[in-house]
Image: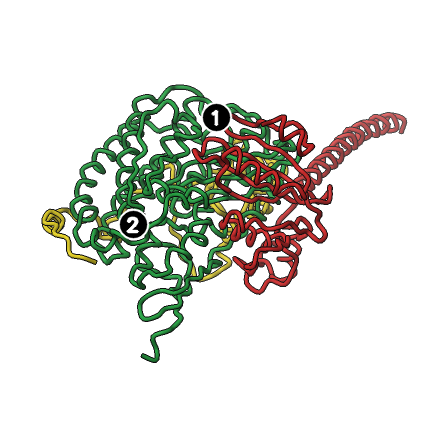
Chain colours: A red, B yellow, C green
Amino acid sequence: MNTLIRNRFGTDEIEVKRDDLSKVTVVKYRVFELIHLLVEQYGYTTLNAITCADWIEEGHFAITYMLTTRARRHTFMVQTMIGREEAKIDSLTMLFPQAEIMERDLHEMYGIDFPGNGNLVELSLENWVHTPPLRREFDTLAFVNELHDFREGRDDNLDVKAEMKRLRALKKAAKEAAAKKEALKTEEKEEASQPSAAQKESGHGK
Amino acid sequence: MKWKVDIGGTLSPIGILGAFFEKPNTIAYPAVKKETARSYRGFHTNTLDDCIGCANCQDVCMNDAIDMIKVDKEYNPKNSSQCIPRIDYGRCCWCSLCTDVCPPSSLKLEEEYLGITKYATDFLYMPKNK
Amino acid sequence: MANRHITIFHGPQHPGITGNMSIELDLLGETILKATTHVGYLHRGFEKLIERRTVIQAFTIVCRICVPEPDPNEVNFAMAVEELAGIEVSQRAKYIRVMMLELSRLAAQFLWMAGQSGSIGLYAVGQWAIADRDLILDLFEELTGGRVYHMYVYPGGVRRDLPEGFLGRVEKVLEHLKTRLKLYDDIFIYNASFRQRAEGVGVIDAEEAVKNGYVGQVLRACGIEADVRKDAPYLVYDELEFDIPTEQAGDVYARALVRRAEMDQSIRILEQVIEKMPEGEIMAKLPTHRKFKLPKDDTWVKVESARGEFAYYMAGDGSENIRRMQVRGPSLVHAYTLLENLLVGAELSDVALIMNSLGICPPEIER
């Protein structure tokens, strides 16, 4: 099976992750041919899931189809990359009816279009007009800061590293000041003993 | 639905009447309180004599619920920042990651879990000094 | 005759404990012509929350994805992280994880009994089932510190060791539950009125079930022996002895019988685990949380929960955050593809009965 898929679809080596899991990556326009081959000839009768990961730095989404054998002993991950602008890939609903709900979920969360799926309406979000939320460019912290106020009373939070530095500097300054004072005191003591000697001399002189 | 004769299935549920003679599962709260296990994750306690103000708890808290605030008197001379943690109970999820990473093990969770207040500012909870 | 064709909203509250989702029904008299499922009451955005948290911070929120049975989520997350990062787990930790999963499965099956009996009006059994489940929750409270959300199965092992005498207390609870289950048999499972209502309702075809990706008791009640614990064993299930119960009829009553038989098998597994529990370490050494990096790779792990096969897709990207974690719970396909087809032609009073028997849990559909 390995050599047949490699030769016919021009893919890399099939990656064997575990006893019951293998993965292969194909180009977008040959995905359905490969899925048909796995279903008809190798007995991968069930579609378990369609997943998507956003690789924004490389400019594509990685869509993976999980196919399982009839005895549920082996799972095959068929992965393909689609562009992030104008993200589109044909729907699998004709072959597997459960693909309809899986594609509806990805459409809402990533904004991917699945031509052929007639039911791409909203699922969990209501009246959502901003960027599809699971895309990496959607910043949840900025979004929340814009719309909501945070709880008051937390302004006395201090940066611990800065406090440690400040206290250490204070301690150092206090130590230096104390040392200076000590030095001054001993100087004064010596001076105090000096004039008495001079007085004694002058007293004698008088 | 056709009627199928099922004598056993019709008579056996009468055994439910035996429940009249059993002890009830409910307890007379608040006269009788249920015992909580010592390891239950309740409110926070912090032994201020041991706390060194390192802010490991603030770093690991996954909801940004911990503030480090200035301490009112010097409990521990080894506390290099003289700051102690205060927890926002509107954000805390009681996962106790903060107690796992505390180096002197001064931050702990006790088994008390009931707190009733009229004011939202009481959610900024200062752990008890134990 | 004028008002026989109406549309109603079988709202987020249902008889029995199903969860918060609603079905829009087109009715002709009492027969259903078309059903549309609506979810969205419980969307909390977990998959986006994970992106801004490190691996150890993310483990604390994963358990909240499924409300009746949180443990398969924790075990799935831990297994995926361990596979990506290459961490070994000790034998004792694996046995403790199996014990947690089976106790959680028992608690979820009791909750199912509460829901199914409530949907036909037999609320007494429902109250008893919740009280018996409470004993299992007391065990969880003692071991992990939380009754429902445990946050206990850590990537690398488990968080705390078993307290003194814990295994003895588990055995006592199991003995008590065995006597109680005989009572449930007489009053609920073999009750003539439950049989009248449940036999022949909600019949599913076996071939369609395999192709469409249905999982769990839906498959086993059609005669197909499918269970992740036997097909692709994980943790220490290949060292334990247990059977997979099946039935042939494919209706609501067959699914109830399968679930009742699975509770006996869970007790059998737990007794073996208590006997075989080894000594040893419970936790592998991990780097501090800001230095724990996952390599650039992806994986797919699965676990058998009380309702079927629960699977996670996880992708790392070389930093300390997780790039993507997608949850594929058993209910996504059951609530849409299966339910909308099964309800056509059914009676209005059977809607709650069918929903409970399919084991639909809305929190995991919309995360």
Label 2 resides on the chain identified as C
- Looking at the image, the residue that sits furthest to the top is C279
Looking at the rendered structure, the kind of residue marked 1 is Met
Where is the C terminus of chain A found, in terms of image quarters? top right
Say above or below: C24 vs A41.
below
Where is the N terminus of chain A found, in terms of image quarters? top right
Q: CA distance from mark 2 to mark 1?
A: 43 Å
Closest to the observer, A131 or A152:
A131
Q: Residues within 10 Å of mark 2 (few under 14, many from 20)?
A: many
Label placed on residue C283:
1
Left or right, C30 with respect to A17, comes to: left
Closest to the observer, C261 or B36:
C261
Query: Hey, which quadrant is residue A148 in on the image?
Result: bottom right
- Element assignment for label 1: loop
Image position, residue C146 (x, y; %): 39, 41
- Looking at the image, the residue that sits furthest to the front is A41
* Residue at the image position 43 percent from the left and 22 percent from the top: C91
Left or right, A3 with respect to B75, comes to: right
- Element assignment for label 2: helix
Label placed on residue C252:
2
Closest to the observer, C118 or C131:
C118
Image position, residue B37 (x, y; %): 33, 39
Image position, residue C270 (x, y; %): 31, 30
Of circles 2 and 1, which is in front? Answer: 2
Q: Residues within 10 Å of mark 1 (few under 14, many from 20)?
A: many
* Residue at the image position 71 percent from the left and 53 percent from the top: A86
Looking at the rendered structure, the kind of residue marked 2 is Val
Residue B101 visible within the image: no
Label 1 resides on the chain identified as C
